[in-house]
C-alpha cells in the first residue's frame, strides 16, 4: 500500500507542478500581451526632471496609469536627450515622437501669422493666457495647427513671466542699457527678434548649453522665467535679475495628430484628463515658485532690480508692430487678444 501511495502522490505532485507551470505560463502570456498592447507615448522636454513642466509630465503619466492601467507606456525624456529643443514638431510629423512640449515661436516658424503670439508684452498674466487659448482664438489656433501641421494641441501650460538674468551686475533701466549684452535666446527668428527688441544682442544657444556658457562668459545673460532658472540652477552662474517681465510665457502640450487620431474615444478622454492634471501640477507649481523667486535669487547672491518697464514695453511693442512679422498677422487678432 505504501508503494501505491507513493506512486499516487508522485502523480499528484507532477500534476500540481504541471498545473502550476501552465498557470504561470498563462500569467506570463497575459502579462506579455498586455505589455505588447500598451501604446508607447514618448515625451520630449528640454528641461531637467526638477522643473515644474517636467513634474507636470510626471503627473500626466501617473494620471494616465491610474485611469487606464497597462494601456499606455509613457516614457519621459528630459534635458533634450531624445530631441533637441525646437525639433519636436518635425519629430512628431515623422512619427518618431508622440508628445512634444512646443513653444509659440516653434509654431510661428511654420505658420507665420502666429508670430503674433511671440510678441513681447502681449499677455497680461496667466489668466489672460488661458482666456485666449481656451477661448475662440485658441480653438481657431488649434484647428489650423492640426490641419496644416498634423499636430494636436491639447493644453497651454504656464511657463512663467520671463525676465533678464545677467552674469555680471550692471545698471539696467531702459532698453539702451542692454546694448552690447550677449543675451542667450532660442534659435528661432521670433526669439532672436525679441532679444534684439529688448535692446540686447540676441545670441542663439540651445537650452542645454546655457549653464556652461554663463559660467565661461560665452554669453552675458539669458532671459527666462524664474522657476525655470531656479530648477536649472542658473542662480549659481548669475549675479543680477532684471525684472523686465517682457513675456508671459507658455508652452503647448501637443500630440502627433496621427497618433491622437488612432486613439479610441475612451483613450482620448483619459489622455485629456491626464493633460489637465499635468497643467494643474505645472501651473500651480510655477505660480507658487514665482512668488518666492525674487527672495530666492537674493538669497543666492543675486541683486534683483526693477527697470522702467513702461519704457521696455513701448520699445518692444513698437519693434514688433512695425516689423515684417506684423505684416502676416490676421486683421483684428491683436485687438481680440487684448480684449480676451
Image (cartoon, rainbow, N blue to C red):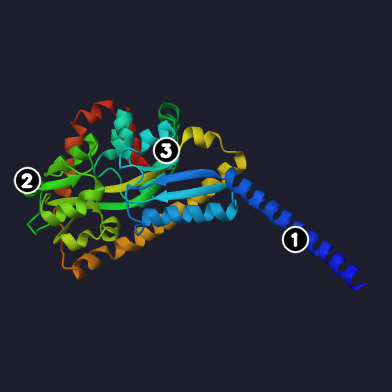
Kindly report which numbered mark, 3 or 1, lies closer to the viewer in this rendering: 1
Tell me, yes or no, whether the two marked residues, 2 and 1, touch with CB atoms within 8 Å. no
Q: Percent x, y for residue 237? A: 16, 60
x 63%, y 51%: residue: 31
Q: Percent x, y for residue 306? A: 16, 58
Q: Crowdedness of circle 1 by 10 Å Cα count: few (<14), some, many (20+)?
A: few
Q: Percent x, y for residue 44? A: 38, 45
- Tell me the CA gap for discs 3 and 1: 62 Å
Query: Where residue 324 is drawn, which disc sits there?
Result: none
Which quarter of the figure is the N terminus placed in?
bottom right
- Tell me the CA gap for discs 3 and 2: 36 Å
Which residue position is annotated with label 1?
17
x 32%, y 37%: residue: 87
x 80%, y 59%: residue: 15
Q: Which quadrant would residue 8 be assigned to in this image?
A: bottom right
Q: Residue furthest front?
A: 3
Residue 166 in sight here? no
- In the image, 330 versus 258, the foreground residue is 258
Query: Where residue 179 is drawn, which disc sits there?
Result: 2
Secondary structure state at the residue bearing disc 1:
helix
Q: Crowdedness of circle 2 by 10 Å Cα count: few (<14), some, many (20+)?
A: some
Q: Which quadrant would residue 302 be assigned to in this image?
A: bottom left
Q: Residue furthest bottom?
A: 2
Mark earlier in primary sequence (3, 1): 1
- In the image, 300 versus 91, the foreground residue is 91
Mark earlier in primary sequence (3, 2): 3
Mark earlier in primary sequence (2, 1): 1
Which residue position is annotated with label 3?
138
Secondary structure state at the residue bearing disc 3:
helix
- In the image, 112 versus 208, the foreground residue is 208
Amino acid at each position: 500500500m505504501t508503494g501505491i501511495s507513493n506512486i499516487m502522490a508522485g502523480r499528484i505532485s507532477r500534476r500540481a507542478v504541471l498545473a502550476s507551470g501552465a498557470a504561470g505560463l498563462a500569467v506570463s502570456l497575459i502579462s506579455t500581451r498586455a505589455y505588447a498592447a500598451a501604446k508607447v507615448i514618448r515625451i520630449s522636454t528640454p528641461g531637467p526632471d526638477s522643473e515644474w513642466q517636467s513634474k507636470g509630465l510626471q503627473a500626466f503619466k501617473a494620471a494616465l496609469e491610474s485611469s487606464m492601467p497597462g494601456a499606455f507606456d509613457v516614457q519621459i525624456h528630459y534635458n533634450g536627450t531624445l530631441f533637441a529643443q525646437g525639433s519636436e514638431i518635425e519629430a512628431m510629423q515623422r512619427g518618431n515622437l508622440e508628445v512634444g512640449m512646443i513653444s509659440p515661436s516653434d509654431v510661428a516658424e511654420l505658420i507665420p501669422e502666429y508670430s503674433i503670439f511671440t510678441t513681447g508684452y502681449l499677455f497680461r498674466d496667466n489668466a489672460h493666457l488661458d482666456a485666449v487659448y481656451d477661448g475662440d482664438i485658441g480653438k481657431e489656433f488649434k484647428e489650423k495647427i492640426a490641419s496644416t501641421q498634423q499636430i494636436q494641441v491639447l493644453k497651454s501650460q504656464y511657463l512663467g513671466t520671463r525676465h533678464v538674468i545677467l552674469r555680471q551686475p550692471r545698471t539696467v533701466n531702459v532698453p539702451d542699457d542692454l546694448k552690447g549684452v550677449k543675451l542667450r535666446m532660442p534659435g528661432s527668428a521670433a526669439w532672436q527678434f525679441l532679444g534684439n527688441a529688448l535692446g540686447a544682442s540676441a545670441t542663439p544657444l540651445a537650452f542645454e548649453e546655457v549653464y556652461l556658457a554663463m559660467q565661461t562668459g560665452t554669453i552675458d545673460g539669458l532671459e527666462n522665467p524664474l522657476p525655470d532658472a531656479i530648477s536649472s540652477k542658473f542662480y549659481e552662474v548669475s549675479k543680477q535679475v532684471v525684472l523686465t517681465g517682457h513675456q508671459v510665457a507658455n508652452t503647448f502640450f501637443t500630440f502627433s495628430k496621427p497618433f491622437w487620431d488612432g486613439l479610441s474615444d475612451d483613450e482620448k478622454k483619459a489622455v485629456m484628463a491626464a493633460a489637465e492634471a499635468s497643467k494643474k501640477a505645472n501651473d500651480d507649481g510655477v505660480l507658487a515658485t514665482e512668488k518666492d523667486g525674487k527672495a530666492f535669487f537674493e538669497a543666492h547672491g543675486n541683486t534683483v532690480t526693477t527697470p522702467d518697464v513702461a519704457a521696455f514695453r513701448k520699445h518692444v511693442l513698437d519693434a514688433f508692430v512695425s516689423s515684417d512679422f506684423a505684416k502676416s498677422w490676421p486683421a483684428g487678432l491683436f485687438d481680440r487678444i487684448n480684449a480676451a
